[in-house]
Structure formats: C-alpha cells, structure tokens
Amino acid sequence: MLSKRIMPLVCSAVFAMSAVAGCANGGNGSISSDGGKKDMTHIVANSDNVKLVGRTELIGDTLWSALSGTGAEFEFTGKKLTVTFAGDNSAIEGNEDNAARVAVYVGGERVVDAQIDAKEKSFTVIDSEETTTADVSIIKLSECAMSTVGIKPLDVGEDGSIKPVKAKKRRIEFIGDSITCGYGVDDEDENHHFKTATEDCTRAYAYKTAQMLDSEYSLFSTSGYGIISGYTSNDKKIPQQTIPQYYGSLGFSYQGFEGDKLPQNEEWDFSQFVPDVVVINLGTNDDSYCKGQSERMDEYTEEYVKFIKTVREKNPDAYIICSVGIMGQRIFQALDMAVYLYKKETGDDKIVSFMFDAQLPEDGLVADYHPTAVTHDKAAAALADEIKKVTGWK
C-alpha cells in the first residue's frame, strides 16, 4: 500500500541523463560526473527488468512503442517512481490531434492519462514516505499510424528496484482496424472525427476480451485498414491501407522511432510472442469498397485466404478466429467463404469464422459512428465465449 496518494506530477525539465553507467544493462547504480552518488537511479525498460507488452523495440536506452496497447509492466519496490516518455515528431511539432496518448497504472488504478506533446514528458507516479511495493503498467492507448512513443529509463529513486511481473499462461493476438484500436470511444458525438485524445484501446473489445480470459495480449491494428482496401468514400480502392503488407513488422506509422526509423521497416520476431489464439477482425473497411459486389467480394476472399496462410505460417499452433460484424455484417459471407476455401485446401481445422452482433442504436455511437464502450463490452463477452468454445478454456 502507498503511504500517501500523490497525483501524477508532470516535470517540465528534461532529465539530464549523463553518466548513467549501468543503465544499458539494467543496473541500479550510477555515479554523477563530479564523482558523487546521484540521489536518483535509472533503469532501462528492457526484457530483463520489465514484462514487455505487445510489439516493442529497444533503441539505445529507450523502449519504443507504435501499436495500440504496447508498453511495459513491472513490480516496483521503493519510495519514488518517475516515468519519462519520449515524444516523436508529432509531439515536437505540436500536433495535438495526433500526439500519442498514454496511461500509467499503479496497483490497477490509472494514475496518468496524458498525451505526449513534447520531446520528453515526465510523471511522478509514486511518491511515498515509506518503502512500498506495487505493480505498475505503462500502456500506449492510441494507435500506431499517427504517433509513436518511447519509455525512457525509469527513475526509481534511491534504493528503488523493479522486476517483471509474472506472465499469464494464455496469449491472444488481435489483428484489426479502428474497432480494435478503440477509435473515438471517449467521444460520444458520432459527428466528431479522429483524435488520438479520444482513442483508448483498453475500452475496446480486444483488450477487454483478454482481461476476461486472463490472457496476455498483442494488438496489431490500424484505423481505416483492411485486407484489400482501406476505407473509401469515393468507390476507389485504397490498396496502400492494408494490414497484410505490414503484419511481419512492428506496425505502421507516419512517425518514426528516434527520428526516421519507421516501425514498418523493422521486422518483428514472432518468437517473442507466441499466441494460443489469433483473432482477425478485418473487413469493415474493405466493405466500403466491396459494397456486396461479387467481383470485389471474390477478390477479398482470395486475398483473405492468402492472409490466413501468412498468419498460420507465423503462428503454426494457434487457433485462428476470423471475425467481422460490429460495424456491419455484409462482408461476412465473403469472409466465411475464405475460411471454407482455406480449410478445404489445407485440411487445417484449427480455424473458425465468427460474426459479431452489429452495434445497436440504443447502445449509442461515438466519433465517426464507431462503437461505444457498451457495444465493446457486448462484443468482448461474445468473443470470449467463442474462444472458450474453440479452445476448451474454462
């Protein structure tokens, strides 16, 4: 228990990170340039010190995140903990609509909810008169396309320490679009448009499903993206906005790690997260192009089969659930056909198709007619039941 509750403190000054010998290898001690002992120590958020969440990459001493839900979890012991985030170009340029939104939880309670709109931004999340032990979780709430964010070495104060929290036994990967990202879930006006400030993946069905099933999760999702086309309003296909081309990477973003290092150019090591279940929820944006037209639906089916093969190659032992329907069910027939053709060709029986219930008017709508938290709750419950049925999980 914390000896006193402290509201998160935003530090306007940028930490001087000189002479942090031992940071790179996770050491707790450091010596200042004048030979005296520093009153605070810094620990790099690497796999030795924290449980990595989702697809992340350590560059120098900074753990970078692009995709929704990525971050780090650890157990902290000490009196004072300060978390510093590194902003990307969207933060430096002051683009509030695109700046990454992050959260920090202490003991399961969200104590930080902020956008990283500066080159560095710091928050004191624990400040106690007595030594305390608490689980801490750092999560990127917004999606990858508009912004990335880094976690700088964690300032644990004198005699502070961290260690990874225990990993859960179950693992689920979710591949999706804006619905998976939690697009607009914090903006209850359907006429409003995209802002990272109103996007929160922890209020969306995928994160909630993982919580219901006590599972580790990894989200690979980008708003507007599909299998053969991104969302279109002029009947023209947008093949640049498709998930399959980026699935083998750290994500997609217009903003890079440490300047111009783009996540889509960084190969993902699939051995770092081996899921028991992969849920694909792609087709809502394709439907804006396909519109039920047989030739376009057939193209979607053909490319979907190819993507299933890619997912199976990368995840040979996982159950695969192919789903759609929260924002419209018209394209489900083409998805179901893809699963049928894939199974017929390969004999793979660890795959099913699943149609979500469509969102209901009485449950409301949020920005750009996306699902509310109520709809996400219903979708999570339905998907959790389907996963239990497929896997036999209790």
Image (tube, helix red, strand yellow):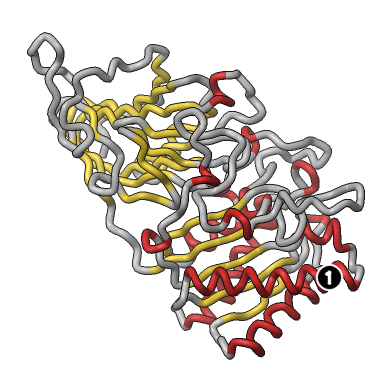
Q: Residue at x 45, y 54 (%)?
A: 268
x and y, in percent, of residue 169 in the image? 35, 68
x and y, in percent, of residue 366 in the image? 75, 44
Q: Looking at the figure, which quarter contains the C terminus?
A: bottom left
The answer to whether residue 345 is visible is yes
x and y, in percent, of residue 56 in the image? 42, 46
Q: Quadrant of residue 375?
A: bottom right
**Which kind of residue does numbered mark 1 sit on?**
Met
Looking at the picture, tell me which residue is in the foreground, 14 or 383.
14
Q: Residue at x 53, y 55 (%)?
A: 219
Looking at the picture, tell me which residue is in the foreground, 154 or 21.
21
Element class at badge 1: helix
Is 15 on the left-hand or right-hand side of 18? right
Q: Residue at x 79, y 43 (%)?
A: 368
Is 48 on the left-hand or right-hand side of 89? left
| 93 shown above or below 151 | above
Is 136 on the left-hand or right-hand side of 208? left
| 252 shown above or below 98 | below
Q: Residue at x 77, y 36 (%)?
A: 193
Q: Quadrant of residue 107?
A: top left
Q: Quadrant of residue 323?
A: bottom right
x and y, in percent, of residue 386 in the image? 59, 76
Neighbor class of circle 1 (other Cα within 10 Å; few <14, some 14-19, many 20+) is many
Which residue has dot 1 on it? 297
| 44 shown above or below 294 | above
